[in-house]
Image (tube, rainbow, N blue to C red):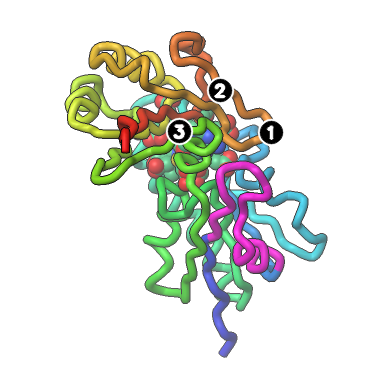
């Protein structure tokens, strides 16, 4: 019987191609199949990070999100469309694994930190040998380029999704020593309002595409509300310890 291939969830870091780990680079080069999630009509951020390392003999398997921000006509539900997409993507990957080929699923940042790889892992890791290679996640890439130490001494860090409703976000931020707010994009205006209401706007730092070639750091009050890209985040660093 044909030995199965291995499923590899490969974190490729937040953008700067030098922020990929030595291990991820080795496994990337050794994998006959390289799969990557990408939004429709885009090149793929994860793909752009590792593109220079690909070799001709490698098979590319783009997994193209059917929707990201689009409104779907009834009766289609976003959750159902996405869930069906992951089912199909998992089977495409499985076909290579069944044929004995290892598949590296590259993932921007870390695969287990809001990473698309998780949805393949959940579907396939019980059927195939799976290995996950951690990556530098975006909030740590962000903290470094913003020059923002995150947490001192016994402070706690809250990682929040900008998708949360206004009041829920406010409640959680009010309690936080330090926070990272992910998934801005269309959520940016709401997030900025909440920060202002809590008196946190002065302390908050904003970065777009941290560590990427087109990184942008803009003071929070100067961000064009509707032009914040999905690949941006806000950091509210912990109060500096005067020790
Ligand atoms: C709905 C929404 C809300 C939300 O984030 O919850 C959402 N994506 C949104 C927008 C968006 N996504 C992308 C772009 C283009 C970016 C660009 O290329 O510029 C844009 C913007 C745009 O299209 O304009 C591409 C993308 N997305 C993911 C990856 C893979 C990865 O990063 O691993 C890549 C390619 C990465 C690459 O290129 O490498 C992954 C995820 N995106 C998810 C959801 C989750 C899966 C779906 C689900 O289960 O709903 C998951 C797995 C995250 C999770 O589950 O946490 C949100 C609307 C926010 C709003 O309202 O503004
Ligand atoms: C689908 S999650 C992927 C997170 C990724 N797996 C990680 O480890 O950081 C996408 C969210 O991560 C954040 N993000 C990812 N890369 C980023 C970057 N280079 N700069 C700023 N934010 C980034 C944004 O908040 C974006 O909405």
Name the quadrant of the C terminus.
top left
Give the vertical position of 98 relative to 146 (above or below). Answer: below
Q: Which image quadrant for residue 40?
A: top right
Query: How many callouts does the rendering have?
Result: 3
Picture coordinates of residue 147, whole percent (x, y): 51, 33
Q: Residue furthest front?
A: 243
| Stretch of the chain drawn in magenta | 10-29
Residue plotted at (56% across, 90% down): 1
Let me know if residue 171 appears in the view: yes
Q: Which mark is residue 123?
A: none
Secondary element type, mark 3: loop
Residue plotted at (55% across, 62% down): 93
Label 2, label 1: how far apart the Cα atoms are: 12 Å
Beta carbon at label 3 within 8 Å of ligand 2: no
Picture coordinates of residue 174, whole percent (x, y): 19, 25
Q: Are marks 2 and 1 in contact (CB under 8 Å)?
A: no
Residue of label 2: 217
Picture coordinates of residue 195, whole percent (x, y): 30, 17
**Who comes first in sequence, dot 1 or dot 3?**
3
For the residue pair 241 and 81, the one nearer the viewer reads as 241
| Left or right relative to 47: residue 158 | left
């Amino acid at each position: 019987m044909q030995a199965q291939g291995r499923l590899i969830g490969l974190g490729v870091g937040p953008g700067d191609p030098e922020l990929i780990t030595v291990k991820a680079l080795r496994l990337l080069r050794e994998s006959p199949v390289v799969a990557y999630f990408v939004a429709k009509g885009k090149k793929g951020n994860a793909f752009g990070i590792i593109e220079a390392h690909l070799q001709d003999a490698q098979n590319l398997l783009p997994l193209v999100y059917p929707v990201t921000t689009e409104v779907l006509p009834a009766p289609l539900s976003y959750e159902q469309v996405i869930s069906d997409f992951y089912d199909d993507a998992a089977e495409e990957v499985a076909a290579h694994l069944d044929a004995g080929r290892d598949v590296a699923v590259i993932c921007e940042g870390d695969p287990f930190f809001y990473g698309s790889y998780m949805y393949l892992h959940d579907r396939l890791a019980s059927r195939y040998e799976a290995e996950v290679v951690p990556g530098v996640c975006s909030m740590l890439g962000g903290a470094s380029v913003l020059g923002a130490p995150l947490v001192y001494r016994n402070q706690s860090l809250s990682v929040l999704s900008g998708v949360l409703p206004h009041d829920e976000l406010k409640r959680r931020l009010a309690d936080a020593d330090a926070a990272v707010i992910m998934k801005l994009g269309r959520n940016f205006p709401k997030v900025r309002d909440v920060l202002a209401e809590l008196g946190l706007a002065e302390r908050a730092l904003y970065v777009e595409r941290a560590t990427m070639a087109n990184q942008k750091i803009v003071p929070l009050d100067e961000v064009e509300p509707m032009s914040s890209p999905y690949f941006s985040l806000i950091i509210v660093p912990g109060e500096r310890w005067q020790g």
